[in-house]
Image: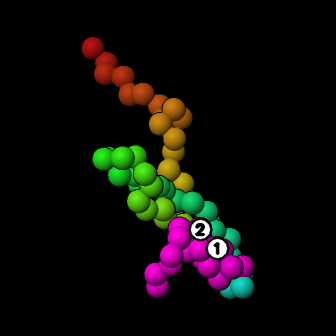
Amino acid sequence: MKFDTLQQGINFYENYAKVSGFDTRLYSTKKRKSDGKISLKYYVCNKEGFRETPDFMQTAKRKDQ
């Protein structure tokens, strides 16, 4: 299915989810390197896989010397 705008696609999936009885969440967003504009957004069922951990929450690994 192809939509004219990103928002139309998001609205369609959110309405479909509501009718089908599940919630959605934004999984990830990809931007073009050339101009920084959003090229892809992944919306998934809220129970799909794991949420990505933000970089600032990841623990740094230390090498023992």
Q: Which residues are magenta?
A: 1-18
Residue 43 vertical placement versus 61 (above, below): below
Q: Residue at x 45, y 55 (%)?
A: 38
Quadrant for residue 10, please give it: bottom right
Secondary structure state at the residue bearing disc 1 = helix
* Residue 2 belongs to magenta span: yes
Tag shown at residue 11: 1
| Dominant secondary-structure state across the stretch colored magenta | helix
Q: Which residue is mark 2?
A: 7
Q: Residue at x 51, y 41 (%)?
A: 54
Q: Residue at x 35, y 52 (%)?
A: 32
- From the viewer's perspective, tell me whether residue 18 is left or right of residue 12: right
- From the viewer's perspective, tell me whether residue 53 is left or right of residue 47: left
Residue 12 seen in the figure: yes
Which amino acid, mark 2? Gln
Q: Residue at x 59, y 74 (%)?
A: 8
Q: CA distance from mark 1 to mark 2?
A: 6 Å
* Residue 9 belongs to magenta span: yes
Of residues 43 and 61, the one nearer the viewer is: 43
Determine whether label 1 and label 2 are within 8 Å by CB. yes
Residue 63 screen position, x and y as percent: 31, 21
